[in-house]
Amino acid sequence: MSQAPAAAPSMPIEFVRASRWYGPVIALNDVSTVLAPGVTGLLGPNGAGKSTFLKLCAGQLAPSQGEVRLLGRPAWGSPEVFHRVGLCPEPDAFWESLTGLQFLIGLLRLTGYDDAECGRRAMQALETVALVEAKDRKIGGYSKGMRQRIKIAQAIAHEPDVLLLDEPVSGLDPVNRRRVIDLIKRLGREGKTVVVSSHILYEVEALTRRVLLIHNGRVLAEGDVREIRDLLDEHPHTVALRARTPRLVARALVDQPHVLSMTFGADGEWLTVQTAKPDEFYGALHDPAIAAGVTEMYSPDEDLESVFRYLVAR
Amino acid sequence: MRDTSRAVPFLPSARAVFGLSLEGMLWSRRSLVLGGLLAIPVLIAIVYRLVLAARLPAEITGLHLYGYLVALFWVRNALPLAALFYATALIADEVEGRTLTYLLTRPVRRSAILAGKFAAYVVTTLCLSLPAAVVTFFVLATSRGVGLAGSVPDLFRDLGVLVLTLLVYGALFALMGVLMKRPLIPGLLFLFVWELIANLPGYMPRFTITAWLRSLVTHRPAGRGVSEMFGQVLPAGLSLVVLAVLTVAFLWLAIRIFSRREYVLDQ
């Protein structure tokens, strides 16, 4: 008697001609792609369809047309897959009255662990994101960076095989930004499927070479981030920093040949820098950022919007 | 050992949602306001005891006043209002606070999420209302002309009716909460317009919730004149069955709708 051939193992995330619209607005249009283990950057300006893509992956939305499969099952309406999936959503939203530890334990209980295992895993996740000391403080009293890190902790605490991260380093100071980037890279190396959504090209570049470019609800390109980067050599990159003493950062950067312009915010806390070489910029930023007490750093969205306009025009 | 091939079983997951929801629900501004509202009878009872008891005719006892408070204040007005404000917000609060994502991306069935949150609502409102009812009873039942021992069974029966009030209205408003984007106005219209049908003669009161509930309050104030004609009492056994069926049906529908609905949370 002949045996039936074994089914080909499915990819962790599969989009088959998936579209999603909200009323008359098309958020994602006829997307077909597979995401394999490792880190994949999901890149696109705000409104491009990244969040819809992630929500479809995370089973929060059903595709209007086509199919989205997560770990071999339809992402919508398959709660059991979330044993193996972690999501770090973008909104800065929490049950503010819970402590960091209560928040993690509560969500781990929902993943089916007993109390002892919940406690162990929660502490492990807190250690990973360097929040052990703040574990008994209410989340309502956390800084923006701490809130971002506890959000990452809840996504990784149950050691999922698929990790969906929406703007995970947004609002982090340079030290924790480095820590989170290292964590994501490590998870990718361990064979987890990590999807990182970002509107900052250089942030994604620090994480992975594999990117999915989304623009106006369509997958514009898929492949190696360096190929895109080569197209952008002349395109300036803008970074906004918030620090106790932004002039200290400015002093350290002003001699760098790649710095094109610097502007101070009226409140005396913000510094906006335009650079032609982001890699060199971030390399030169590390020490002065610590000395100047940089607490927040982001790349304005218009920057990537212009990058996409530039790419589309080519 | 966890079975990762299926969702976490209903009871453990509902209990986990209950644990996550209870504290936020109990220690909220909503609880402060509604706790104050639900405790008003305690103040009335104290005023009666200190000032009014000696001046009112002897036939108006503390238990008469207690009967009024149970039937007209808690069962007819305050508890349905508390149910409206809590139960319509069971999921709406999570949507507004954008925390629903954390619950929907766990290996739990949505029925367990709603059940856990409904249980947290019931415990919260019971914590706010039952102590007030017990204190009111004892303040009024120990006033002149009232034998305490004989009235204690009434207290337990009333507490049961208060629980039923919270369950049936809570289930209805949980359904309205998942069905409508802005359920408060329809809920208020239901409570203070539709429920007036309970005072009509004939078959119509059976289409209200309050008519079934008030039929379970045995020492409700006696109707006089026109109100005696219209305030009809339905059989207690049938009332219990109808209220149980309504509670289950409303909850079942709420779960069905919540399980199929997409929530597009604003960024």
Image (cartoon, rainbow, N blue to C red):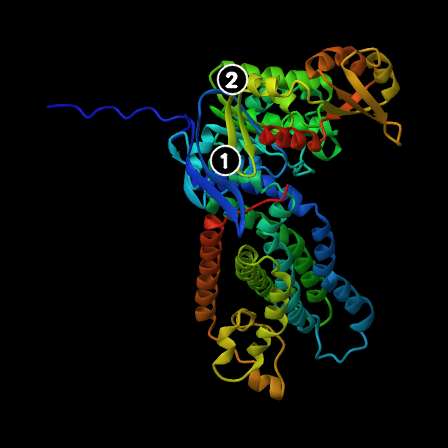
Circle 1 crowding by C-alpha within 10 Å: few under 14, some 14–19, many from 20: many
Q: Position of residue B248 (x, y in %)?
A: 45, 58
Q: Is residue B83 above or below residue B188?
A: above
**Residue A122: in sight, yes or no?**
yes
Chain ID, mark 1: A
As shown in the figure, which amino acid type bears the numbered disc 1? Ala
Secondary element at image label 1:
loop
Q: Is residue B227 above or below residue A138?
A: below
Q: Residue furthest left?
A: A1
Q: Are marks 2 and 1 on the same chain?
A: yes
3D distance between C-alphas at marks 2 and 1? 18 Å
Q: Position of residue B67 (x, y in %)?
A: 64, 71
- Residue pointed to by mark 2: A188
- Residue pointed to by mark 1: A58
Badge 2 or badge 1: first in the primary sequence: 1
- Looking at the picture, tell me which residue is in the foreground, A236 or A100: A236
Image quarter of residue B133 = bottom right
Q: Is residue B183 above or below residue A308?
A: below
Residue positioned 58% across, 31% down in the render: A312
**Residue A68: in sight, yes or no?**
no
Circle 2 crowding by C-alpha within 10 Å: few under 14, some 14–19, many from 20: many
